[in-house]
Structure formats: C-alpha cells, structure tokens
Amino acid sequence: MSLLESPAIERFDHWADQRLERLRGHRVTDRIMLAASELGDFSLIWHWVGAVRGLTSIPHANQAFVFSALIGLESLIVNQGIKRLFRRTRPTETGDPRYTVRRPSTSSFPSGHASAAFFAATVLTYWDGWAWAPLWFGLATIVGTSRAFVRIHHPSDVVGGALVGLALGGIARACLAAFG
C-alpha cells in the first residue's frame, strides 16, 4: 500500500469531498469552479495573467516571456516527471457527471492545475510584492480546489499539487533572484 492509499489520506479525501458536495449544484459556485477548472487547463489562466501584466510596463513585458517559459518548465517537471512516479488513479475517469471537463491523460497525483497555480502565485508574488499575494494565492486556491470540485482529482491530489507548486515556485524565485 502506498502512502496515498493510507486510511488517513482516504479519510481526508472523503471528508473534503463531503464538504465540497455541499457546494456542488449551486449555480454560481458550479459556474465559478467549472470556469476555474477549464481556465487552468494548460495553465491558460496563468499565461493570460502574464500577458496582461506584460501590457502594463516594459519590465512586466520582459517578465511575461520568462513567466510563460517557467510555467512550461513547471508543467514538464510535474506532468512528465513527478506524476510518473505515483501513477495514482483518478476518483472518476471523466469527473463528476454534472460537469463536463477535459479528460486528463496523466495520473491523478499531484494535481497539475494546483501545482501550476501555486507555482504561478509564488512567482507573481515575488515580482509584485506581498500586497498582491492575496489575489494570486486566492486565485490559485480556486483553480486548485476546482479540480476536486469537479471530481477529476482527489482533494489530497490538490494539496499535494499546491505543495509541489510552492516548492518549485521557491526554486524559481531563488533562480530569479540569483540571475536577476
């Protein structure tokens, strides 16, 4: 039995899914979570954020290119590296039948949406300062949570993805600081 199959993780996943079920079926929540899940596909939301920031100044324009490259590298590490180590099955093959979502081809752990979201929030906070952290991490939390909401990930996949994203974001911040 792997750590991800432990009774404690299963209890957490069940507990969190029960809390999310209380939110499912509400028109506004459903729309927000489905939109967040779809915008997280291929890190689209983060590329858009980088592009919009890039329109505001020359330094931000330069950061937009670096940001997209970093997001691509993060995706490669998570989807072609870390996920291959775990090969965890998803809670459902296509997600909750109430929500139409893209069927991922990689394993469930860690959530790539959550990893990319927390990676992006970490890098954006480094560039924009702590005043922007509530926006970036709030958005990251919604994107990550949306994946458990639509049942394409276990809640523990989202937590694991967030931790991976924070760790990779910390490495990216250190590299950005070192290489300016």
Image (cartoon, rainbow, N blue to C red):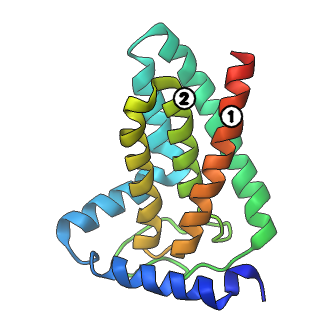
Q: Could one spot residue 38 in this view of the protein?
A: no
Q: Quadrant of residue 22?
A: bottom left
The answer to whether 33 is drawn above or below residue 169 in the figure is below
**x, y percent for residue 132:** 39, 32
Look at 72% across and 48% down and name the residue there: 76
What's under tag 2, amino acid-wise? Tyr
What's under tag 1, amino acid-wise? Ala
Mark 2 to mark 1: distance in Å? 10 Å
Q: Disc 2 vs disc 1: Cβ atoms closer than 8 Å?
A: yes
| Nearer-the-camera pick, 63 or 165 | 165
Question: Element type at marker 2?
Answer: helix
Q: Is residue 31 left or right of residue 145?
A: left
| Nearer-the-camera pick, 106 or 143 | 143
**Residue underneath mark 1:** 172
- Residue lying furthest top: 58
**x, y percent for residue 118:** 54, 48
Earlier in the chain: of badge 2 and badge 1, it is 2
Q: Could one spot residue 180 in this view of the protein?
A: yes
**Residue underneath mark 2:** 126
Look at 52% across and 82% down and name the residue there: 12
Look at 54% across and 88% down and name the residue there: 11
Question: Element type at marker 1?
Answer: helix
Look at 68% across and 70% down and name the residue there: 107
Disc assigned to residue 75: none
**x, y percent for residue 39:** 42, 50
